[in-house]
Image (cartoon, rainbow, N blue to C red):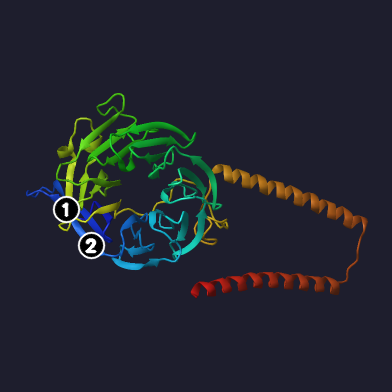
Amino acid sequence: MSAALFCASAGSYEGSIFGWEVKPVADSKDDGEIEDLEASLAFGFHTSVGAIRAIANSGSGRYLVVGGTDEVIRVFNMVTKKSAGELSATHTGTITCLQFYEDSFLLSGSEDNNICIWRIQDWECLHILGGHKDIIHDLSIHPSGKLAISVSKDNTMKLWNLVEGRMAFTRRLKGAADQVLWNSTGDFYLLVVRDEVQVYQASTNECVNKIKCNSRVNRACFAPPGQEGGYCIISVCDNKSFIVFDSSKNLGDATKSFKMITLPDTAGRPKSVKYVQGSDGKGYAVIITSSGAMMALDDGIFQSDTDFDDVFCASFSLDIEPRLTCLTAWNPAAKMTKNNYKTKGSQKRKAGLGAAVECEDDIIVDDDDEEEEEEEEEEKGKKKGKKGKAKAVKAQEEPVKKSKKAKGSEKKKESERKKVSFGGQTSVVKMVNKKKKH
């Protein structure tokens, strides 16, 4: 039995979740060549009393989380295919967005205007980011794990410093954005505002492109660009269109550099799209529709002379036709890999995403942070050196004779002070742990 190239999961308006596996199918000959792909239903069950509005998988695909109108985040272990529990009593509104940072942290946004940061190790809520004045529509974590962007019904976009657990920047938008998303390198991010996809360059925070669609954009995602420094965006719209935009290619329209693929009349309205790298090294665009169908398209979508029949490779339609609302997709063979960022070990976190675990994973820092810390250490060293010299001069000017007994007494007192300080910290930790148990 062949292994899955990729997996996908979706939530529905009726409160159910479904999972699919897409596998290669060999042709009738015994030459081992792949003829087609086949999609099969891996699981499907009812899990919520209300509609599911958000779904996400961890970096390795080990965990799947869903949230919706019942204000509860449900966690599933995809290795054991069992429920891992519920995260409740924190949000007081519909869960609108969920995103993992690797297998370490989870961010959740809600209609209560707040963002919660969860630690995956013990599913503890570490920090609550407040600042929006209305429903949070979406959020996205920077690939470094140090920043996040959120958009809200209050017509603002906020940039969050996750290392310090505070808001770093606010931008007023001309209308509420429905979606925000970083690309895989963190060089660009997109905003979906009604029938338009706006692309911003992170280094300047300026809008570099506006992709105008002729219908409301339901969802958009980044795909690997044709050239370094470029960007490629896939979006699905209410008029059953699938739009591909590549800044580095001419896909049929020299003025807009995008192509439009129309979905079949039998397909429902496309609700969401994800781009996933399969275990075969190829890329696939996964789409869900309002009529309960999941479709997979191959990387031929980036060619200018292809239509739907040319790029279609697999699909699965549910007989009960659930109204699918949200989608996630992942490569089951993917292993956790660290980002190409420098790490600094054994450093205590401040409040925020990197702040949650004080004695565990390495915190991500960049060169500027390291240089600043080195400069601070040098300054502290210089100050200590000056103080030491001053004390030495003073000691020479006013010599004080101390007996061995007095010295021993002082050492004992100093040792006791250290023990008291250490013991105090230990007792605080124990008290915190006791509270967590209750």
- Quadrant assignment for the N terminus: bottom left
Q: Residue at x 17, y 48 (%)?
A: 314
CA neighbours of label 2 inside 10 A, class few (<14), some (14 to 19), many (20+):
some
Q: Position of residue 168 (x, y in %)?
A: 54, 45
Task: Describe residue 391's horizontal placement relative to residue 270 as left or right.
Answer: right
Measured Cα–Cα span from mark 2 to mark 1: 13 Å
Q: Position of residue 355 (x, y in %)?
A: 54, 57
Q: Position of residue 233 (x, y in %)?
A: 33, 38
State the residue position of label 2: 44
Q: Secondary structure at mark 1?
A: strand
Task: Describe residue 52's horizontal placement relative to residue 310 as left or right.
Answer: right
Q: Position of residue 285 (x, y in %)?
A: 26, 44
Q: Which residue is outermost to the left? A: 28
Task: Look at label 2 and name its amino acid.
Answer: Gly
| Closest to the observer, 127 or 101 | 127
State whether residue 36 is above or below residue 258.
below
Task: Describe residue 230's horizontal placement relative to residue 325 as left or right.
Answer: right
Q: Residue at x 43, y 47 (%)?
A: 153
Q: Is residue 231 visible?
A: yes
State the residue position of label 1: 317
Q: Which mark is residue 308?
A: none
Task: Describe residue 58's horizontal placement relative to residue 5 as left or right.
Answer: right
Q: Residue at x 25, y 32 (%)?
A: 259
Label located before the other in sequence (2 or 1): 2
State whether residue 185 is above or below residue 429.
above
| Closest to the observer, 89 or 58 | 89
Q: Quadrant of residue 255?
A: top left
State whether residue 238 is above or below residue 13.
above
Q: Residue at x 28, y 34 (%)?
A: 214
Q: Quadrant of residue 418?
A: bottom right
Q: Is residue 152 visible?
A: no
Task: Look at label 1 and name its amino acid.
Answer: Ser
